[in-house]
Amino acid sequence: MLFGHGDHFSAGLDLADVAPHVVERGPGALIGDGTYDPWGVWAPPARRPVVMAVNGIAFTLSIEFALAADIVVAADDVRFRQLEVGRGVLPFGVATFRAPAKLGWGNAMRFLLTAEEFGAQEALRIGLVQEVVPAGQHVARAVEIARSVAAQAPLGVQGTLDNARIGRDGGEAAARDHLAHLLPRVMASADAAEGLQSFIERRDARFTGR
């Protein structure tokens, strides 16, 4: 789960503070010592699904968190804006390449090149968020979705996430090869056997991650 406390998610980085570090290290400045990269670009990504809840002001890097997340729930008061081009720079989280891939070229360029603000319904239309709920309910709804994911078979969830990310970043051929090696192992797991047995017995499965 990724969310912000209070009435707003984030206005983004303080450019005056971060600019010297970016000049020195490039976009890698965003991940500190490189132990963890929430964008999954410069260091190993999170190996668990990321469900994000976003509300209020959600500028610049907030959008890039949403582009890197797997499922995003937005409050109906959310205000998105990718305003770097109006500050003489360009987005350096993941927006320049994740937005065209996830939202379509025209939708991405519309907000990347104009620095215009847009709200929850536009974000839903272009696919930046997957659900819009009343402000104040966004975290609870995201938790509900996260719990639904957590109730599924761990190996199935992890395999789905890994294969989808490989396809997104490496293309269809890479995803196909990965799937060919992954599928037999998952199908031979205790969880797959439990899933089949629960189907036969018409009951909820009890997965163990093995």
Image (spheres, rainbow, N blue to C red):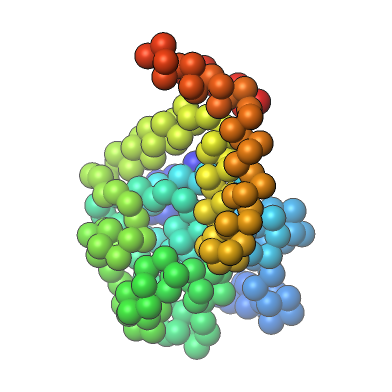
Q: Could you tell me which residue is drawn at 54 percent across and 64 percent down?
A: 172
- Name the quadrant of the C terminus: top right
Q: Position of residue 188 (x, y in %)?
A: 63, 29
State the residue lying farthest toward the right: 33
Q: Could you tell me which residue is drawn at 53 percent across and 45 percent down?
A: 160
Give 158 or 138, whichever is nearer the viewer: 158
Q: Is residue 28 visible?
A: yes
Please state if 110 lies on the left or on the right of 143 as rendered.
left
Q: Position of residue 147 (x, y in %)?
A: 44, 30
Give 32 or 160, whichever is nearer the viewer: 160
Give 154 or 93, whichever is nearer the viewer: 154
Please state if 17 lies on the left or on the right of 60 as rendered.
right
Q: Position of residue 208 (x, y in %)?
A: 60, 21
Q: Could you tell me which residue is drawn at 23 percent across and 44 percent down?
A: 134
State the residue lying farthest toward the bottom: 88
Q: Is residue 203 visible?
A: no
Where is 172 relative to 20, above or below? Answer: above
Please state if 152 lies on the left or on the right of 32 as rendered.
left
Give 33 or 188, whichever is nearer the viewer: 188
Where is 104 relative to 69, above or below? Answer: below
- The quarter of the picture where residue 176 lies is bottom right
Q: Position of residue 31 (x, y in %)?
A: 68, 61
- The quarter of the picture where residue 142 lies is top left
The number of numbered badges drawn on the structure is 0
Q: Could you tell me which residue is drawn at 65 percent across and 73 percent down?
A: 27
